[in-house]
Image (cartoon, rainbow, N blue to C red):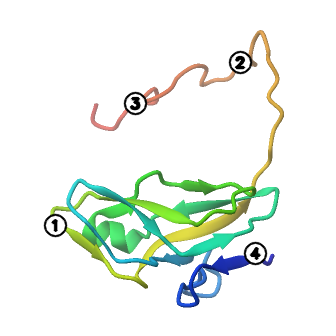
Amino acid sequence: MKIPVVRRDPSNQLPQFAHPGDAGADLVAAESVTIDPGERALVATGLSMSIPEGYGGFVLPRSGLAVRSGVTVLNAPGLIDSGYRGELKVALINHGSEPFVIEEGDRIAQLVVMAVQAPQYLESDALEETARGPGGFGSTGVRGA
């Protein structure tokens, strides 16, 4: 699959895979930003892209950034719909105890493009029974509880 990408500035970096076989391509900051502890920021990538219909772009945290600094994608996964043509921006939050400085060119998130189906939702009077039934949050128990 080939995805057309427009760079707002020639210095903006296209998404890149760090290793062959990686599912996520690194997204890079197009600006410098400092995120104080407990704060959030919308960080520009300087990129717009044309994700094909039938696919979605999912913006995911970089695990090393989360573990080392407590910085992660706020709305993980962020969703880029196939019809969106605006600039990609990444919502980040700093759960760490120190201000986190992002410099232009730093890797801030990963982009995974996956096939998605658009179902047709039909109103129904009842749903089929399952072993789980209506059990939701915490319904299977928590170890130690």
- Expressed as whole percent of the image width and height from the top left, the position of residue 127 reads 74, 17
Query: Which residue is under mark 3?
Result: 141
Query: Which residue is under mark 4?
Result: 3
Category of crowding for the residue at label 4, using alpha-carbon neighbours closer than 10 angstroms: few (below 14), some (14–19), many (at least 20): few
Secondary structure beneath disc 1? Answer: loop
Type of the residue with mark 4: Ile
- C-alpha separation, residue under disc 4 versus residue under disc 3: 43 Å
- C-alpha separation, residue under disc 4 versus residue under disc 2: 42 Å
Secondary structure beneath disc 4? Answer: loop
- Expressed as whole percent of the image width and height from the top left, the position of residue 134 reads 57, 19
Which quarter of the rendered picture does the N terminus lie within? bottom right
- Expressed as whole percent of the image width and height from the top left, the position of residue 84 reads 69, 57
Q: Nearer the viewer, residue 139 or 137?
A: 137
- Residue 17 figure quarter: bottom right
Category of crowding for the residue at label 1, using alpha-carbon neighbours closer than 10 angstroms: few (below 14), some (14–19), many (at least 20): few
Q: Are marks 3 and 2 in contact (CB under 8 Å)?
A: no
Q: Residue at x 77, y 9 (%)?
A: 125
Q: Earlier in the sequence, mark 3 or mark 2?
A: 2
Q: Are marks 1 and 2 in contact (CB under 8 Å)?
A: no
Category of crowding for the residue at label 2, using alpha-carbon neighbours closer than 10 angstroms: few (below 14), some (14–19), many (at least 20): few
Q: Earlier in the sequence, mark 4 or mark 2?
A: 4
Secondary structure beneath disc 2? Answer: loop
- Residue 58 figure quarter: bottom right
